[in-house]
Image: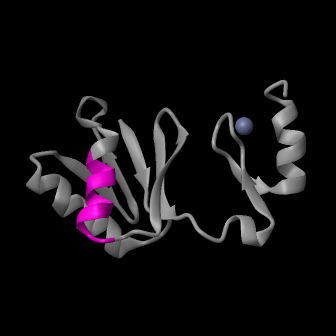
Amino acid sequence: MISIDLANDVEIAKELQDYLKSKGIDSHLEAAEIKIDKTAFDLKIFKSFLKYTKRTKHSVKKINPKLFLISISVGVEDLGMGTCEICGLVDFEEQLFSHRWTHGI
Ligand SMILES: [Zn+2]
């Protein structure tokens, strides 16, 4: 199973489930998280969903091989936060600095 976290946005989660259904993909909705079978997972579907619903500020981010996050990506840097280039972890810059060491950078 692959989980797609909609960052607590229940509205978009429901829309995404309907969209997946229209593409013939079964999914399971739990609050603002959608679970779909690994074999049905295709990143392109989520990108086209955002395009289709005109959510230009949203982006799909890979958190780990089993978890993807769809959220508004602008503003992260404004909050003094950043993203780990290796695993995509979003955290405060100071935390990321020491976190990157765990990857051996
Ligand atoms: Zn990392």
Q: Residue at the location (90% across, 41% down)?
A: 98
Where does the C terminus fall, quadrant-wise?
Answer: top right
Left or right side of 70 for 77:
right
Task: Report the residue that reaches farthest toward the bottom.
Answer: 11
- Residue 104 percent across, percent down from the top left: 84, 24
Render colour scheme: one colour
- Residue 45 percent across, percent down from the top left: 26, 47
Q: Residue at the location (68% across, 65% down)?
A: 76
Which region is colored magenta? 45-54
Where does the N terminus fall, quadrant-wise?
Answer: top left
Task: Report the residue that reaches farthest toward the top.
Answer: 104
Placement of 86 over or under 48, stated as above or below = above
How many labels were placed on the picture? 0
Magenta part, dominant SS = helix
User: Which of these two is toward me, 32 or 94?
Assistant: 94
User: Which of these two is toward me, 94 or 51?
Assistant: 51
- Residue 31 percent across, percent down from the top left: 38, 65
Left or right side of 71 for 15:
left
- Residue 38 percent across, percent down from the top left: 31, 31
Quadrant in which ligand 1 is drawn: top right
Placement of 8 over or under 20, stated as above or below = below
Residue 91: say if magenta.
Answer: no
Left or right side of 37 for 18:
left
Q: Residue at the location (41% across, 45% down)?
A: 3
Residue 50: say if magenta.
Answer: yes
Rendering quarter of residue 49: bottom left
Q: Residue at the location (17% across, 62% down)?
A: 18
